[in-house]
Image (cartoon, coloured by chain):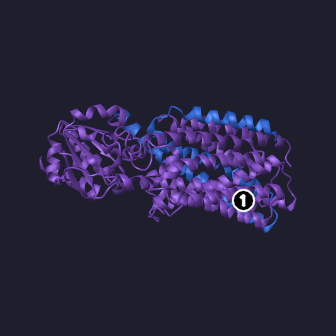
Chain colours: A blue, B purple
Amino acid sequence: MEGWIALYIFMLAAFTGIEVIRRVPAILHTPLMSGSNFIHGIVVVGGMVVLGMADTTAEIVVGFIAVFLGAGNAVGGYVVTDRMLEMFKSSDKTKKKE
Amino acid sequence: MIPGLDFIVPAAYFAAAVMFIYGLKGMSSPVTARQGMIWAGFAMLLAVAVTFFHPKVEGNYLLMIIALVSASVLAWWWARIVAMTDMPQMIALYNGMGGGSAAAIAAVELLKVHSGQVQLMPTTLMVAAFGAIIGSIAFSGSLIAFAKLQGWMRKTWRFPSQQLINLVVFGVTVLLGLIIFIVGPNPFLLLLFFAFALAAGILITIPIGGADMPVVISLYNALTGVAVGLKGYVLEIPALMIAGIVVGAAGTLLTQLMAKAMNRSLGNVLFAGFGKADEDAVGGEVAGEMKSIDATDAAIQMAYAEKVIIVPGYGLAVAQAQHKIWEMTELLMSRGVKVSFAIHPVAGRMPGHMNVLLAEAGVDYEMIHDLEDINAQFPTTDVALVIGANDVVNPAARKDPSSPIFGMPILDVDKAKNCIVVKRGQGTGFSGIENLLFFEDNTRMLYGDAQKVAQQLIAGIKSLG
């Protein structure tokens, strides 16, 4: 990929990340860290691509590890975040009842 | 090859990138957080599904599915069964896996370059090596953080000239990366390179104390994001670049916010460690003595108070006392006592950790207050009940310029008319700093496990009828 274009993508993505998070209440810091932890689980896609082109045993083993770890990151990150947010939801409900 | 795939695959990645950003945006408000997470989850499924049709993927489909399914089942199961109090280390663990995945991707790419099947531009090769270093450090560092928070590794390891050794190990890693860049990768060099990068992550993390772990985990989270973004560049998948760098930037900002809440700089967290500062500072004499109180008296004091503020800390999380505390709070409220909760930005092990636990117990949002909102209320409060919090209520942060935590914003519980501190023993807190609060005239210590104490307090209040 053209290096400069990549650099522009990185720059814009960095600003997006900062802007999206800037005014977040402190109570959401942990869920948010957990949520962003889930999002970088997208690395599993990269793992699938390298495993998909692996030929030698070493490549296949390491590629397998890449997919395994990436999938663990994504699924674990999702469940952890979901469990945290579930709690916010339940307290929302009690508030509405009153 | 199905026609149109060369359009569908990149289009799906593009859609996934949009949904990730939209989802993250949603997560920045409590109301839309869950919805945001669902968007992000959908983006992930879509991206994984179309990757089976990625033009570079030529085989090993079965292995791919085995890896995906086995990891998903394991991660799902473990994330389901752990207690809410253990969430911080689970984030560390899953984050480490992401970093490890990025490092493994780099390893395969570099092996491919070695066998001549893949040609990488010099810049790309450099980016691949750089991403490998960051991913490896995030991997081994996060696992150490996990082990520490899980209690598998209690000690903070410090040895002479540690900084220097860390620097050397890191320097050698970078040097090996450069050699790979110049002479090209070969298996032996790669093995050495990854070994050093992993060692660097371990060495950086072992001297850091538990109190600083949230900041460190957040930093590794950001690093993994950056590593993923760099892998996206190497593999030419923009969705990875965007998701990775967005997380990298957001994570860096989050790390700074956390460090700021503790009044420490990031460099201070990483390179100084609490330990060194205290050894000189803790010595300062403390006037007065600790006075204890029993649960019955404490219950009476609160039951006849007009206004009570509860300050929860990590001790509450460890003892899983949130439900009992809420039960006690409801009893107090039924007697007409005005009760609120005050939460320090870094109470517990992570910002928001206490909020999550209290929400789990069913505490109403509106009863929970931030430091800025509630500090002015302490002088008019009859009883401040501190449960398992320590450094965040230490008046030394206001009074003692020689204290390592001087300047850190704290909850002014010492200004309340009475202060009851629930604590397991007489020892110092996580930072090892003596807490001046415990020696104040209006402070009473109530020793015991937070859960049991809460039980006794409930019994005490009930007995008043």
The image quarter in which residue B338 lies: top left
Quarter holding the C terminus of chain A is top left
Please indicate, yes or no, whether residue B53 appears anywhere in the rendered image: no
Work out whether A65 lies above or below A18: below
Tell me the kind of residue under disc 1: Met
Q: Which residue is the site of mark 1?
A: B64
B221 displayed left or right of B121? left
> In this figure, what is the number of numbered marks?
1
A8 displayed left or right of B269? right
Measured from the top left, where is residue B312 in percent x and y?
Answer: 33, 46
Chain for numbered disc 1: B
Measured from the top left, where is residue B453 in percent x and y?
Answer: 24, 55
Measured from the top left, where is residue B439 in percent x and y?
Answer: 22, 49
Q: Looking at this view, is B317 or B277 the one in front?
A: B277
Label 1 SS: helix
Q: Looking at this view, is B301 or A51 the one in front?
A: B301
Measured from the top left, where is residue B397 in percent x and y?
Answer: 34, 42
Work out whether B380 lies above or below B328: above
- Measuring 21% from the left and 32% from the top, which residue is drawn there? B380
- Give the class, few, some or many, for how many residues have Cα within 10 Å of label 1's Cα (few <14, many ≥20): many
B407 displayed left or right of B255? left
Q: Looking at this view, is B288 or B111 the one in front?
A: B288
